[in-house]
Amino acid sequence: MSDKLEKRIDELKKTLKERGFHGIASVNCTAVPDVVVDELMPCLPDNEFKILMCIIRQTYGFRRDSANIPIEQMIKSAGLSKQQVLFALRTLKELNVIKTETSPENGLETANYSFNLERWGVCES
């Protein structure tokens, strides 16, 4: 194994350990629309894909169509900076991949997010 690969694996092991990952004890799932894997994963940049998966986890993973998700939660879940999360959210919104709704009481720190099913033909309009 090359030194570069060994270093990368050691870094990933350390990160997984810090996050408390010790393997998968049982299978529980978040439904991910096929279009996300087939059409979006190959073309979305890493940060945008991570944030999309955070939104899908908080929505479909809890059997909801939308969810109020704090920016701080996305930062922690995706392992990104606040600036990277906000940039990815703006990009996903401009691409019409997600829908967002903010409220005056929550401001920009927490918004309601959903995957834009109509845009991707996942459901009937």
Image (spheres, grey):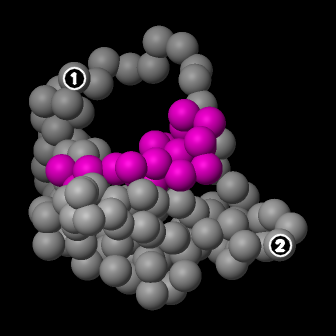
Q: Considering only vertical position in the picture, is 109 above or below 70?
A: below
Element carrying mark 2: loop
Disc number for residue 20? 1
| Span shown in magenta | 54-72
Does residue 125 appear anywhere in the picture? Answer: yes
Could you tell whether 89 is left or right of 38 in the image?
A: left
Q: Residue at x 18, y 50 (%)?
A: 72
Q: How would you rate the neighbour count of disc 1 (Cα within 10 Å): few for under 14, some for 14-19, many for 20 or more?
A: few
Q: Position of residue 93 (x, y in %)?
A: 45, 79
Residue 113, picture quadrant: bottom left
Q: Position of residue 98 (x, y in %)?
A: 51, 70
Element carrying mark 1: loop
Q: Amino acid at mark 1?
A: Gly
> Does 55 appear in magenta?
yes
Could you tell whether 100 is left or right of 76 in the image?
A: right
Q: Position of residue 92 (x, y in %)?
A: 44, 77
- Residue farthest toward the bottom in the current orientation of the protein: 94
Q: Position of residue 19 (x, y in %)?
A: 19, 30
Does residue 46 appear anywhere in the picture? Answer: no
Q: How would you rate the neighbour count of disc 2 (Cα within 10 Å): few for under 14, some for 14-19, many for 20 or more?
A: few
Q: Residue at x 14, y 64 (%)?
A: 82
**Residue under label 2:** 125
Q: Residue at x 31, y 18 (%)?
A: 22
Q: Considering only vertical position in the picture, is 123 above or below 88?
A: above
Along the line of sight, the residue nearer the viewer: 58 or 28: 58
